[in-house]
Amino acid sequence: MIKIHDKYFKPFISASEIDLALTQMATAISEDLAGEIPVFIGVLNGSFMVVSDFVKKYKTPCEVAFVKLASYEGMSSTAEVQRLIGLNIDLKNRHVVILEDIIDTGNTLQEIYTIFQNEGVQSLRIATLFYKPEAFNKDLKIHYIGIEIPDKFIVGYGLDYDGLGRNLPEVYQLKNTEPMINIVLFGKPGAGKGTQADFLKEKYKLIHISTGDVFRFNMKNNTDLGVLAKSYIEKGELVPDEVTINMLQAEVEKNRDANGFIFDGFPRTVAQAQALDAFLEEKNMEISGTLALEANDDILISRLLERGKTSGRADDQDENKIRIRFEEYNEKTAPLIDFYKAQNKFHSINGIGTIEEISARLNAVVDQL
Ligand code: AMP
């Protein structure tokens, strides 16, 4: 997801989908105009990218021009009149193709079409990369359509939102929901992070990333990552930062249009927290809050041993390994409390009580984020 000015946009049409649509349009037009030298006319500003990429795919000779619609006040009336500027080719008896980035209501197109019709052209066609059938309300034939899209505001690939976004190589769609919620679920092993993540995920429609679960999935499938992680996990030690950070980033990348994320079991070291902040910043995202589930060691150990009876997790079945995990936490993970307190993002939650009670405490904090 990206932010432009005050609004959030999510990925909508990829650069490769655009490329394919333009290739198909170029093929169709060159077949229809075989033997002719058409004039492609782009309507500025939005169409500069479409025209540039389109003509590179047009394999036979053609001419290219750009026009812009400008409003001016008529001499004898105060009514606004639209006028084309920039046209420097005589279009008489030419095959003209108006090349648009997007056709929305068709208002601009109608103006341009009428002006060109009066130029004595031999044929006049309309081609557009994006077309909004629900918004179009003119009685005009559109000869070539790249991609039909719903009546939603889009940005990128030449299209702007209040001046910005034209340089994006792919197209984004306005997101009507609230800004993302990105939560770090923090706490010692056994604090109930996984259980509570399931509730939060449902309630706030978030993507839950548990690094422990991803490692276990890899271990089960015997991947290179799994084999590497196993040697640490079985001893109750942390997997090296670099490995964990790369894995976490890949998981975020897989869910590019998420409403937000629950990071469960990550970060577990200051280096991981710094890497997470830097990575999120690159994506115009940030941690909304760190929610720490607090409970004392005796309760946690008995919870973990209980879980070990059914979970099959070797690291839950041996009290020594559990103690090593706690030591790892005290030494490497606990410093994150100060890290997030310094950012004013740390929230401590009493992790003792029924699942519903703890869940209600978490929701109360998330609702304030
Ligand atoms: P968990 O399911 O979160 O208790 O994680 C189980 C084990 O996976 C931990 O004891 C670590 O060995 C490893 N692990 C999970 N997350 C991380 C992390 N962020 N950094 C390093 N190791 C991790």
Image (tube, rainbow, N blue to C red):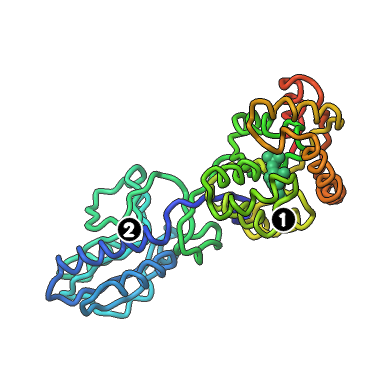
Which residue is labeled 1 in the image? Answer: 277
Q: Is residue 271 above or below residue 307?
A: below
In percent of width and height, residue 284 lies at 64, 55
Which of the two discs, 1 and 2, labels the residue nearer the N terminus?
A: 2
At horizontal 78% and vertical 37% (from top left) the residue drawn is 322
In percent of width and height, residue 196 lies at 69, 30
Q: Which quadrant, please, contains the C terminus?
A: top right
Q: Residue 37 occupies which quadrant of the picture? A: bottom left
Three-letter amino acid code of the residue under disc 2: Leu
Q: Is residue 288 above or below residue 116?
A: above
Q: Secondary structure at mark 1?
A: helix
Q: Residue 207 occupies which quadrant of the picture? A: top right
In percent of width and height, residue 315 lies at 71, 38
Is residue 119 or residue 159 the one in the foreground?
159
Image disc number at residue 239: none
In percent of width and height, residue 71 lies at 43, 64
The local crowd at label 2, few if under 14, some if 14 to 19, many if 20 or more residues have their Cα within 10 Å, is many
Which residue is labeled 2 in the image? Answer: 109
At horizontal 38% and vertical 61% (from top left) the residue drawn is 16
Q: Horizontally, is 355 left or right of 44 in the view? A: right
